[in-house]
Amino acid sequence: MAVDTVTATAPPAAAPQPKRRNRRSRRTPTRVGWLFILPNVLGFVAFTLIPLIAGLGIAFTDWNVVSGLSGIDFVGLKNFQVLLTDTKFWESVLRTLFFAGITVPGTMILGVLLALALNRDVPGKIALRTIFFIPHIVSSIAVGMVWLLLLNPQSGVVNLGLGRLGVSDPPDWLVSQTWGLPSLVLISIWSGVGYCAIIYLAALQSMPPDLLEAAKLDGANAFQRFTTVIWPALMPTTTFLAVTMLISHSQGFGLIAFLTGGGPGDSTTVLSYYMYSEGFQFYRFGYAAAIGVMSFIGVLILTAILWRFQKGRGLYT
Amino acid sequence: MSSRPVALSRAHRRRRTTTLVTKIGSGAGLWALAALFILPFVWMLSSSLKRNIDVFAVPVRWIPDPVQWSNYVEVWLGDQSMLRYFGNSLLVTGVSVTGDLITASMAGYAFALLSFKGRDKVFLIYLATAIVPYQLLLVPRFMFFQQLGLYDTLWALILPGIFTLFGTFLLRQFFIACPPELGEAARIDGAGEWAVFWRVYLPQAKPMLAALAIIRFVGSWNDYETPLVMLSDERKYTVPLGLTQFIDAEGGLSAGLAMAASVSSVIPILIVFLIFQRQFVAALAHAGLK
Amino acid sequence: MGDFSRFSRRTVLGGLAATAGAAVLAGCGGTDAGPGGGSPDSGQLNVWGGVPAESGPDDLIAAFQKEHPGITVTYTRYVNDDSGNLKLDNSLQGGVPIDLFFSYGAGRISKRVNAGLTLDITDKVKETPELAPFAADASPQANYVFDGKIHTVPAALSPGFVLANADLLDDAGIEVPEDWDVNDYHEIATKLSRGNTHGSFVAPEYARMVLGPDMYYAEGGEASRIEDPAFRTGLELSLAMQNDNSTMPKQEILAQKLETFSQSAFLSGRFAMMATQAYMLRYVADTKEYPHDFTVRAFPLPAPIKGQEHWNAGAYGDLLSISQKSQQQDAAWTFFTFWLANAGTYMVKGGRLPSVVDPAKTDDILDSLLGEEKETLYDVDSFKPVLFDDTVKVPVDTIYTGATEIEQIVKKSTDQVLLGDMTVDQWVTDVKKQADAAIKKG
């Protein structure tokens, strides 16, 4: 694709609009901009957006897959009305908030620390980066089995260690109603930290070196350099990670399905698992889609908040 | 900083020693922590050389006894060799990741650094779509692909992989942190928009492209749900789907074989990792940052 | 810069609505070709089933094609889990060419029948003498009948039985009484428990054996019958057996995922007895992957109440149906009857007992099931009476409203009781309430 040179001045159409920032006030001709995004947008509309809209439509129906298109029965807002009084739904909302509320920031804090550590000249750097990414690579059965072994109430390393430290009544972890969800938080942080670190690392390494040099010349110590230079420059990446992890933790259920199946009781039934049960196990696809829509709205609100937060931080000062 | 040369040199020396100490210290600390992360791979490796009855024995025995090398032989040379699944996976993953790097970097760049009509609206829809639980997509996508005649073809896996929200979003966030002055300077020198993107900005993004390539490769390589729903012909199976042959009708797992196949399946990922890690390091040297 | 605040909600909704229209258009216009009969001796058939091709189907199909050279059969294996079944339903509905398919479990088949995905084969079954036990009016009921019509025939029958570690029994000098009941079972399990070895895996399925078909439903299926004392008695038995260590503790079972991997635990001698079905024998026979140095012996399930007739906890399985959309229903029927008649020859090595048994062939079936090392691995004589007992009553459910959800509620709550998080009384109230709600939701 070849794009012609464009004028460096803003086209008149843009002029009347008041701009909040004068940065990038120069407008690209619409045609040029669209040419850049067109390949992706076309594919996106065809393979994601269209099926997705159809998926959202299911939320207003009483439908199970087996009955096919002819069996679609529009019920309006009924599914949502039922949801509002469904205590299982609200309980799983709370669990999701707890789960994502700790997992997302926890993973990101540890991820950025790990990225900073791996960005230094440590022996075996490349091997280390790969190792921390392993939970992301290997089969989920392996991940699940290892944690079942580590957290086994009787023979697990964790409880044996706690016993050595004099803890007389250590938790039963995954088989406990109280500790099931915290265990999953722990495991999720562990498995996400390498992924976060890789992305932070890439952002760190493409950071303009003169930025850091300038900070060094100003006599800033490592901590100051981090808070004043590195962290603000990482802000777009942080937003990206916060949003994508929020999304994946509001959708993922593979590990929960394997490790606890939502139990004991309903103690680890988060929203995504509840949706999975209703749709894929009980074949109430309309209801499951309604749960999906509610989850969508919730994450949308949280994303909007994150977005504001990022802007409030004065990224481009 | 201090103006006295003596003090400066002493401070410098002290800093060098502390750097060395922290380097060794943090290295040791990281390696200790790494042990916890390598554990699943060790479990997989160990299980891949075990008989089924030993895989789930408690307490776990990390060294297999006897060592069942035949698991690998059966996985690779048995009646249903994984070879074909590997070929399919390489094709699907290779094409979709390469395509995604191209479309995502173009779109991400435009969303971040070009200012044009309709841009923000499109981006908002992108972002909103990413938030919709993907399980909602599964059934409609199946029906849609069936209409398009893509069902039971590898295209059903490749095409959605070429156009991802994830890549676009990641690169948008990267480019938005890039100084716009770079492009302005090139434009003043008479560079076209494409040249500004291709020669000025894209090289900057090398580490991020490497990260995206790694993450998308892993995602595509390990994807189970999409091929499960879209493929029925066993000759078109990808590796994760091929693993289902180790699950029997009652849901029982031939764990030794499954893990031998899983260990084999991780190797291409490790290779990709090492290749793109070079990109990380190269970018580092390029930037002159040590 | 993605400026969130600047977009009105209307812009988004407008965009969504426009694309929704496109989606509906794209989704419509599916293949509507009517079903056809075709010829009984030629055609190309697509068969979908959950058994891996190499554990029987391949051999059976090879034999079929030898006998019917005009018909080509392609077997597609789907994994019988949630996603795999969704794939089958999608494909049946979406017009993927499938002529015959297997369903596993009454809940799954009932959904497919109600959605009109299966061919009504009532008359075809009636005209086939070999299939008489599965006709709509057969007694005892051995088939799933929907509104008096037959849409499926089970190709497998798996009676439940107790599989025991014979060496442990003999070492303890225990004789199992022929008419044992659950209390005898409990007592024997207690005697067999030593150190890390438990007498039994879990407690017997008391409620199922007492109540039989539709155990969760009150007459008519409008409400649950969790309040039936059988549930309480069964739960108390489980609790008692866990408390005196004669079964494995629930905590251990969950923490090691033993519900999925029970064969490993049994064959490494961690417990002495378990109620199971024929598929378990395939692991016993697999001495390469599951080496063990003891023989196993089979017993009938213990009666819930001594001397009283009761239900068996096993099930009819491998429910074969012809797709309503099949273009070659006659050829499909040819294959259908062939499968049912020959499952006993080809499918047994995969641990599946046929539903149609030629009495002259029981020894062959047994040989094929127990494998080559049968003399050292099994107390062979104990198996024939439990596997081919005509008098056992295997329950056939007829009500499926919310069945999957009720099963999940019962399982989770039972886990809670056995983990000490819930009392038996709470169990009854809670499960009753939730099961009734599940039935209402449908």
Image: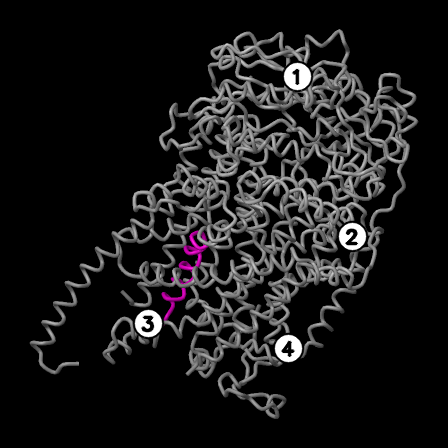
Q: Give the SS element for disc 4.
A: loop
User: Horizontal placement of A172 versus B91: left or right?
Assistant: left
The residue lying at 56 percent from left, 10 percent from top is C175
- Amino acid type of the residue that numbered disc 4 sits on in the rendered structure: Gly
Badge number at residue C300? 1
Badge number at residue A63? 2
Badge number at residue A226? 3
**Residue A192 x, y percent position in the rendering:** 45, 55
Distance CA(mark 4)–CA(mark 2): 36 Å
Distance CA(mark 2)–CA(mark 1): 43 Å
Q: Identify whether C224 is placed above or below C18.
A: above
- Residue closest to the eye, C322 or B284: C322
Badge 1: chain ID? C
Distance CA(mark 4)–CA(mark 1): 73 Å
According to the picture, the residue beneath numbered tag 4 turns out to be: B118
Q: Magenta residues, as a range?
A: A189-208
